[in-house]
């Protein structure tokens, strides 16, 4: 539950100036002015404007010459939106400068003036991103979304649309992370990745802007390879390489110096879980649970040349919350292992039978060097079977059903898609079931002569729906892929329907006594979400904590009731909205709430007469607030004089539109005593005494 805190009345009068109307690390006006974006699907976000029923957003290329108006000659995007957020998925291209602006439109259809323009650029697409060849066989059967995948040995991860157009790239230093691999998009929109340089590697979390958010603790990350996942508790679990000196078993080893009884380094795997603070909270090692007698003799025969034995070579991990179990894929042992997370004991091993007799499940399934284990919604397992050293050598995606018994489960293949011989993949690959029932299969063989990678979408009856082809370009290949609805799993905005018009600061007028505040929340991401809202204020009128569940594209209202007591000064009301599964996206909204109609101000907030309200606090130390109303536009001055009549501060001096205003005098550098504040505006003059007491 969110921590609750109360703001004092005195503190509130200061915060009104120091804190903007909406402050949060992940909200505000987006894109940030002057930013360069490595994506072309762009989230635009803005502040609520009083009286707005709709907003018009315009984006133009800012490459015009001769002083031409880009919005008149190079319009790229024009849309209308009634919320405070819009995700633009077309109209923007790479390596372009853009300018954007916004204006509000009231319920009668009258548009206000345009905001000041803001600028951003889209980045240059790296040369390592090739042209992708796309074949579409059935548009109606395509699972909508973006396909994410790595370009192996380039340090680049990309996301492409159905037509193969890149909409995102994440480029890492190729000298540090040539094998950067997409693992998963997290609920907050950040991306979990691995970076593998055999035998070393790491894992990290980056934003869409490629800014580093998290990496493993120093000294523990060097052995991470292939697979990393986010646990339901928010922790990170990764496959790591571990080494131990072990005896050489008997066998037909070719090197006469490499004989039984001697020792050699064995590469095994530890599965390690860290919390986000970098503390190790769970570890499981193959050396503690597997029999050394279980080896692939063909792999061990290469140990003299390598100087080590690549014993287990884990390449995938999956956590099942229903059974509280972890599944690991061990390529070199042709084995899937189910582990009880709580006890760390092996529940069963599935795959080829070996010397130890510890493999008892699915010994007839005939898969070899498999990748990408996952559990489907129907509780079946899916994996990519590379099918190495078997006849015929035809890679395939397979779905395995498990029938539980009193001893060991019975496993059978209930679905498979066999790839053509040209797409046989010896050392990598991926297989994912999509929401529409189709399957996304990645086939990538870096040793291929003409084709290095395919991503295929196929139906349950093995019909080909969509295909991406990556031609040979000197060593680049694919490792895995994933189809996601877009770039923004979580995006939301909130509107307060009763904002007073004609006032710059978000202001709400409520009657004294029983009163309520309404807020409308919009889920504009692609994930369903539970939002926790907390309302606190300076005077204790409104305090509540609750939650609201919204499906993607859904909106909902929540109401906060309270008792309002008359007070001449504004009550600062703070509304905090936190997505339950993405707390980093917490947003804070601040409103000034008045318990009365100010002198000379209508109930809708528009001034009818000039007013210069009493300074508050007064006496003060060292800050006081000066509030005034202008029924018409004109030149305004607000000046502070000392007791001798000498001007000591000029707070306002210039043209202002009609409306309500507040100015603050920070008098920390002035001596205690009596001062006078004078407001002049189009024939209106009013002076009041204020007292600084230190």
Image (cartoon, rainbow, N blue to C red):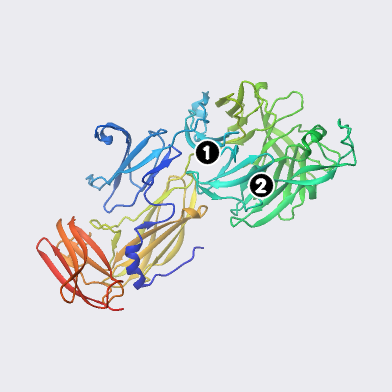
Q: Residue at x 88, y 41 (%)?
A: 262
Q: Looking at the picture, tell me which residue is in the foreground, 229 or 264.
A: 264
Q: Looking at the picture, tell me which residue is in the foreground, 647 or 686.
A: 647
Vertical placement of residue 359 versus 500, above or below: above
Quadrant of the image occupied by residue 437:
top right
**Residue 281: image x %, image y %?**
67, 57
**Residue 219: image x %, image y %?**
66, 52
Q: Secondary structure at mark 2?
A: loop
Q: Residue at x 32, y 52 (%)?
A: 48
Residue where numbered disc 2 is placed: 222
Vertical placement of residue 41 versus 417, above or below: below
Vertical placement of residue 554 versus 434, above or below: below
Q: Residue at x 79, y 42 (%)?
A: 266
How crowded is the residue under tag 1: few (<14 C-alpha within 10 Å), some, or many (20+)? many
**Residue 165: image x %, image y %?**
47, 30
Q: Looking at the picture, tell me which residue is in the foreground, 470 or 464.
A: 470
Q: Residue at x 59, y 57 (%)?
A: 277
Mark 2 in CB contact with mark 1 (< 8 angstroms): no
Residue 287 visible? The answer is: yes
Q: Earlier in the sequence, mark 2 or mark 1?
A: 1
How crowded is the residue under tag 2: few (<14 C-alpha within 10 Å), some, or many (20+)? many
Q: Going by the image, does 434 lie left or right of 428?
A: left
Classify the position of the C terminus by image quarter: bottom left
Q: CA distance from mark 2 to mark 1?
A: 20 Å
**Residue 420: image x %, image y %?**
66, 22
Q: Secondary structure at mark 1?
A: strand
Residue 458 visible? The answer is: no
Residue where numbered disc 1 is placed: 171
Outermost residue toward the left?
Answer: 683
């Amino acid at each position: 539950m969110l921590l609750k805190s109360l703001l004092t009345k005195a503190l509130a009068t200061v915060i009104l100036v120091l804190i903007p109307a909406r402050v949060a690390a992940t909200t505000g006006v987006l894109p940030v002015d002057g930013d360069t974006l490595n994506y072309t699907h762009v989230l635009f976000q803005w502040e609520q404007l009083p009286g707005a029923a709709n907003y018009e957003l315009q984006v133009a290329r800012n490459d015009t010459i001769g002083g031409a108006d880009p919005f008149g000659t190079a319009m790229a995007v024009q849309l209308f939106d009634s919320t405070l957020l819009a995700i633009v998925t077309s109209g923007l291209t790479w390596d372009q400068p853009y300018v954007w602006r916004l204006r509000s439109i009231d319920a009668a259809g009258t548009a206000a003036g345009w905001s000041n323009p803001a600028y951003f650029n889209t980045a240059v697409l790296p040369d390592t991103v090739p042209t992708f060849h796309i074949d579409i066989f059935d548009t109606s059967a395509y699972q909508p979304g973006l396909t994410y995948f790595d370009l192996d040995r380039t340090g680049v991860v990309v996301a492409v649309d159905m037509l193969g157009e890149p909409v995102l790239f994440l480029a890492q230093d190729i000298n540090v992370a040539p094998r950067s691999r997409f693992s998963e998009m997290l609920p907050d929109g950040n991306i979990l990745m691995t970076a593998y340089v055999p035998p070393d590697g790491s894992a990290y979390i980056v934003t869409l802007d490629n800014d580093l958010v998290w990496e493993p603790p120093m000294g523990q990350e060097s052995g991470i390879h292939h697979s990393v996942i986010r646990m339901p508790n928010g922790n990170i679990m990764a496959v790591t390489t571990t080494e131990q000196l072990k005896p050489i078993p008997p066998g037909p080893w070719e090197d006469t110096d490499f004989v039984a009884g001697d020792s050699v380094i064995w590469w095994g795997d530890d599965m390690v879980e860290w919390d986000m603070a970098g503390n190790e909270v769970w570890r499981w090692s193959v050396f503690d649970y597997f029999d050394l007698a279980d080896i692939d003799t063909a792999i061990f025969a290469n140990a003299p040349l390598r100087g080590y034995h690549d014993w287990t070579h884990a390449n995938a991990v999956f956590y099942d919350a229903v059974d509280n179990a972890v599944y690991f894929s061990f390529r070199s042992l042709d084995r899937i292992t189910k582990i009880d997370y709580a006890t760390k004991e092996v529940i069963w091993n599935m795959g080829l039978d070996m010397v130890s007799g510890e493999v008892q499940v699915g010994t007839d399934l005939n898969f070899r060097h498999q990748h990408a284990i996952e559990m489907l919604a129907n509780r079946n397992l899916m994996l990519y079977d590379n099918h190495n050293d078997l006849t015929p050598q035809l890679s395939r995606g397979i779905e395995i059903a498990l029938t539980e018994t009193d001893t060991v489960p019975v496993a059978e293949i209930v679905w498979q898609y066999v790839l053509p011989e040209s797409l046989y993949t010896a050392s990598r690959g991926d297989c994912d079931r999509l929401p529409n029932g189709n399957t996304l299969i990645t086939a990538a063989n870096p040793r291929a002569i003409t084709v290095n990678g395919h991503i295929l979408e196929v139906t349950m009856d093995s019909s080909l729906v969509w295909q991406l082809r990556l031609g040979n370009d000197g060593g680049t290949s694919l490792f895995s892929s994933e189809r996601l609805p877009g770039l923004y799993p979580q995006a939301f905005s909130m509107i307060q329907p009763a904002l007073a018009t004609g006032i710059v600061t978000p202001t709400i007028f409520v009657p004294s006594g029983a009163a309520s505040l309404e807020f409308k929340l919009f889920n504009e991401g692609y994930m369903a979400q539970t939002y926790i809202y907390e309302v606190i204020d300076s005077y204790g009128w409104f305090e509540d904590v609750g939650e609201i569940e919204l499906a993607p594209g859904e909106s909902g209202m929540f109401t906060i009731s309270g008792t309002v007591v008359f007070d001449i000064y504004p009550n600062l009301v703070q509304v905090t909205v936190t997505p339950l599964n993405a707390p980093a996206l917490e947003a804070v909204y601040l409103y000034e709430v008045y318990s009365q109609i100010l002198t000379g101000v209508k109930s809708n907030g528009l001034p009818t007469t000039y007013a210069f309200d009493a300074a508050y606090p007064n006496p003060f130390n060292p800050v006081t607030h000066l509030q005034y109303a202008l029924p018409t536009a004109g030149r305004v001055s607000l000046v502070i004089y000392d007791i001798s009549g000498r001007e000591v501060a000029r707070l306002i001096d210039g043209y202002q539109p009609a409306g309500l205003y507040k100015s603050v005098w920070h008098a920390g550098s002035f001596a205690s005593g009596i001062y006078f504040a004078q407001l002049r505006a189009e024939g209106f003059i009013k002076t009041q005494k204020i007292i600084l007491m230190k």
